[in-house]
Structures are given as C-alpha cells and as structure tokens.
Amino acid sequence: MITIPDFLRYNRQMMLPEIGEDGQEKLKKAKALLIGAGGLGCPILQYLATAGVGTIGIVDFDTIELHNLHRQILYTENQVGQAKVVTAKSVLETLNPLVTFIAFEEKLTSENAASILQDFDIIVDGCDNFTTRYLVNDTCVRLNKTLVYGSLLKFEGHVAVFNHKGSKNLRDLFPEPPNPDDVPNCNLNGVMGTLPGIIGTMMAHETLKLIIELPVLKNELVIFDTLKWHFTKLKF
C-alpha cells in the first residue's frame, strides 16, 4: 500500500503513466541484491534506494581506500579503512529511511552464493572480476533469477539483462571466462571517475524497468564508448 510518505517522496515518478501507483507499489515490494559496492555499485545503490525499491541487499567484503574516492561516490575520506558494505548501508539509510537494507559483509563464493541470492527477485552484478561474474550468472541460472549485468573497460561500458523470462545468459554470449592475465582491469589501466556513474545509472534504470515491468534489453548487449559517444547494441 502506498502511504502518504511514499507519495510525498515519489510522486514525481508516480506521475509517469507507465509507473503510477501500481508501479510504485511494485518497487516497494521488490527485493534487489547488488553484488559489489564499488564504482558501479555506488550509483546503482543510490538510484535504487531513492526510487523506493523496498528491500536492497548489498554483498561486498572490501574496505574503502583513498584511491576509490574519485568514483565510489557513497564514501568520503574520513571513512577510509571502513567496510564498504557497512558504510554504504549507513549512508543509504540516511538517504532513504523508507527502504530496508541488508548487508552481507562476505566474499561471494560457490558455497554461499545460492543462500544469499535465493531470497531476492533481481540480482544486479556490479563486481569487478570474471570469477565472480560467472559465479553470479551460473547461480542465477540455477535459481532462475533475472540478472542485470554491467562491466567497464577504460572509457567503455557494457550493459545487459540475462536470464529474464527465458532470455539467454552470460555463457550464451561468452561461454567461458577469459584468462585473468589477459584481461585489463582498473588497477592496471585506470578508469575515468564518471564512467562507473554512467554505466551504473544505466544498470539501475534497467533494474527499475524490470521491477515495474517495462520493456528491457532481451538478448542484447549494449556497448557504450563514452570517449567518442558510440552507442552499439549487439543481438545474441
């Protein structure tokens, strides 16, 4: 049921005929789980929280470091050394006290993945390594969970929706993970601070559309080159 505080907070998006009170009610009842509270995770968490997704889980085992701060915009310098997931939960509760946040301060593994993912409707992958990406994908397939996927490389970002109402999954696009030694990463190649914000916002947008049951990506990979503003959609 939409309450007066709900209406006062969310009425601007409820004015959209595609959302309305029914859509806001769907957001309020939804349970979304974010894997990774880093560069992609920070904007995703902020937009899911402020849009009114009722329950948001956060999985991360890392601590805040000074070099995170140019892109991980939930955190400040006086929080360096603190656990990301605990800090994120505290900040987000201030941002929107109407939302329930559940923190999992642990590394996602083959032993705990199913038990963590099983109680959530939509899984959002904001991690930064292929081992976890494939673990998340395979667990979503096993549990029949929709997965919102995103990744970053220099000035380029990728976004897709996997395993939604019979659609394909990550292994249909890339059957096996690449050799870690062959894959560039932010630690070695760097990342412009705004790129995770752009791609993370796109992932949050697609997550909200999924919950409200608006049209979303299906068997399509968005490739966004933000250096030259090239936007490509590949069907697979």
Image (spheres, helix red, strand yellow):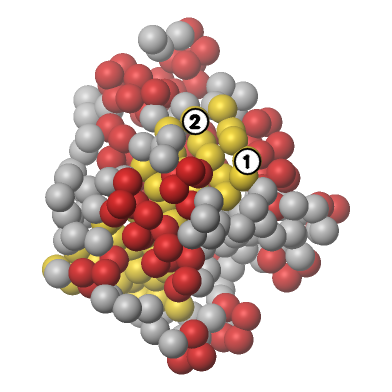
Front residue of 177 and 69: 177
Residue 106: x, y in percent? Answer: 64, 53
Front residue of 25 and 7: 25
Residue 197: tell me if it is visible. Answer: no
Residue 135: tell me if it is visible. Answer: yes
Front residue of 19 and 121: 121
Disc 2 secondary structure class: strand
Residue 71: x, y in percent? Answer: 62, 63
Disc 1 secondary structure class: strand
Residue drawn at x 29%, y 60% is 160
Residue 118: name its quadrant.
top left
**What is the C-alpha distance between the residues marked 1 and 2?**
11 Å
| Residue at which label 1 appears | 103
Q: Is residue 166 left or right of residue 159?
A: left
Q: Work out whether 92 lies above or below 7.
A: below
Quarter placement of the C terminus: bottom left
Residue drawn at x 56%, y 22% is 98
Q: Is residue 144 left or right of residue 198?
A: left
Residue 233: x, y in percent? Answer: 20, 68
Residue drawn at x 85%, y 53% is 78
Q: Work out whether 59 lies above or below 134.
A: above
Would you call the spot at circle 1 few (<14 residues within 10 Å), some (14-19), or many (20 or more)?
A: some
| Residue at which label 2 appears | 55
